[in-house]
Amino acid sequence: MADRFNREKSIHLKKVNELKKEFPWYITEYIEAKKKHRMSPTTLAQYSRDYINFLKWLIEQDITHQRKLSDVPIESFGELRKSDAESYIDFLHIDRELSDVTVNRNISSLKSLFKYLSTQTEDADGECYFYRNVFAKIDLIRSEEDHSQKAATIASKIFQGNTDKEFLQHMVEEYPRQLSHRALAHHQRNIERDLAIVSLFLGSGIRVSELVQITLDDINFRQNSLNVLRKGNKKSVIMATKTSLDDVREFLKVRKEKYIALDNQKYVFVTKYAGKCNPLSIRSIQHIVGKYTETFILKRMSPHKFRHSFATKHWLANKDQVSLMRQLGHNSMETTTIYTNIDITDLEKQMDKMDEYTDQK
């Protein structure tokens, strides 16, 4: 038994040492500190894999502009917003379809790392590397939650009913009334683009990582469809509402003039910086969504919450779980089931019938 334990310990430590080669210096420092405090090699290996995935996500979301994991600066950790942390947990739970147990382990591993970096480190000035521990604000998923409870949690954070349409109207009519003259000019330059982005999120359930990659050739206005690149570089076709693509069409009418979009600029959603046209980054789109929602519901929403909003409305309108699973790109019906639990209208009607029931015999 002892030989087996030592062999497994050696395997896990070897794996940790391999993963360390990809880490930035501050995560390596954390790993070495935990080794000294005799953290289990099994736990160290699990945590190390979690950190690799988290670093990859930061790069994919353009939260850091570095392309190598080892180059991700510590400032990316210290400047992380709560909404970013929540988006990562959503990504693990919804996109990667991980179990609550696995998601909780990821949360715990990041809590441990961020606590160390913000309370137990010391730079040349005797200060911690940073003090803003965003993962201290993230709660573990309660294991006793069933689908109905998870659905209730999602329902409290998304647009329901016609709130999505009200929000789009707010962007055009109410939002600009709150702006200064300079900010208003910026808004007027970008409103067609911003409206198209938000409308497409709410009208297709597209992921932000998919939206930034859409090219002019990917849109089929005749069939109301989009070619998208899913996780794992899998190509897929999804549908979009006609109204959302109408907003995209209106943006395309002004895209060339407003953003100096040359013929070789195939990405749909662009920005103009220093007189040049460039594709919008994921981070920029998250900022666009956040600034509008903050003035509408007094809190910032992420594009992923728009995806939840679309999925809920799709289910309520169609009651077709298979087509919803295909539209969202889920690999399992189990993941899509959560949206079917948000609608409790039928349950309420059934309970009303209980009150009205009388025995006719």
Image (cartoon, grey):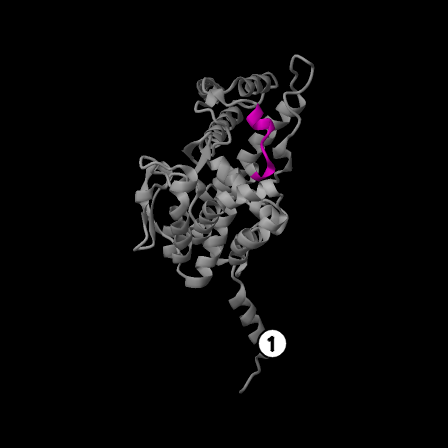
Residue 75 figure quarter:
top right
Q: Position of residue 135 (x, y in %)?
A: 61, 34
Residue drawn at x 64%, y 37% as measured from the top left: 137
The answer to whether residue 45 of the structure is visible from this angle is yes
| Location of residue 55 with respect to 216 vertically, above or below | above
| SS assignment at label 1 | helix
| Location of residue 265 with respect to 41 vertically, above or below | below
- Residue range highlighted in magenta: 75-83
Residue drawn at x 59%, y 40% as measured from the top left: 182
Q: Position of residue 69 (x, y in %)?
A: 46, 23
- Per the picture, the main secondary structure of the magenta-coloured stretch is helix
Nearer to the camera, 171 or 356: 171
The answer to whether residue 146 of the structure is visible from this angle is no
Q: Position of residue 326 (x, y in %)?
A: 36, 51
| Location of residue 214 with respect to 310 vertically, above or below | above
Magenta region includes residue 1: no
Nearer to the camera, 330 or 261: 261
